[in-house]
Amino acid sequence: MVKRRDELIERRKFIRVSIPIGVTYARPGEDALHRSVSKDISPEGIRFETELGSIRKSDPLDLALEIPDAGNPVHARGRVAWKKRLSLADGSPFDIGVEFEKIEEDNKNTFLKFLCDVIYNATKEK
């Protein structure tokens, strides 16, 4: 959120869902795969923790999202939108926000249905 003259302006188009799902990620063309767990996710992007200090804003990432009850992971391509160190201690991990650029066609329905179900069930519980 951005604060301007005593009013808050929401820049996000979609609600973020705080739910842990497994994320495997790699830079395109690299063999090294890294694993993490999401902190929040929306139709536009995902936030998760990484130990990789070499990841930079605007870096592309290939992602595999482990959606519960889905037979296969959802494959997506994203770009690092921001990166923030979690602590001032040396070697502390980073949170990164990755904006989705493309979700494989075969996986879009699985991904969007999962998000809709999570949001629906969260509002139903309240």
Image: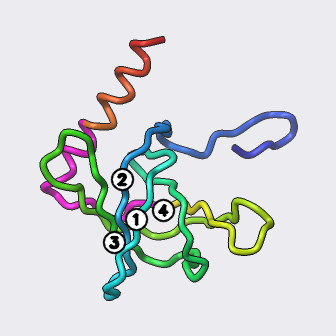
Report how far apart the C-alphas of labels 1 and 3 lie in the structure: 12 Å
Quarter of the image with the N terminus is: top right
Nearest to viewer (mark 2 / mark 4):
2
Which residue has dot 3 on it? 62
The residues bearing labels 4 and 3 have C-alpha atoms spaced at a distance of 10 Å
Closer to the camera in the image, 33 or 126: 33
For badge 4, the amino acid type reads: Val
Q: Are marks 2 and 1 in contact (CB under 8 Å)?
A: yes
The residue identified by callout 1 is 35
Say few, some or many: other residues with alpha carbon within 10 Å of mark 3 (under 14 / 14 to 19 / 20 or more).
Answer: some
Q: Give the mark nearest the N terminus, 2 or 3.
A: 2
Q: Where is residue 99 drawn, in percent x and y?
A: 46, 61
Q: Which amino acid does label 3 sit on?
A: Asp
Is disc 2 in contact with disc 4, using a CB cutoff of under 8 Å? no
| Quarter-of-image position of residue 90 | bottom right
Which residue does the numbered mark 2 point to in the structure image? 22
Disc 2 + disc 3, Cβ < 8 Å: no
- C-alpha distance separating marks 2 and 1: 7 Å
- Where residue 55 sits: x, y (%)? 55, 78
State the residue position of label 4: 98
In the rendered view, would you say 59 is above or below 125? below
Q: Is mark 4 on a helix, strand or loop?
A: strand
Badge 1: residue crowd in 10 Å (few <14, some 14–19, many ≥20): some
Q: Nearer the viewer, mark 1 or mark 3?
A: 1
Q: Earlier in the sequence, mark 4 or mark 3?
A: 3
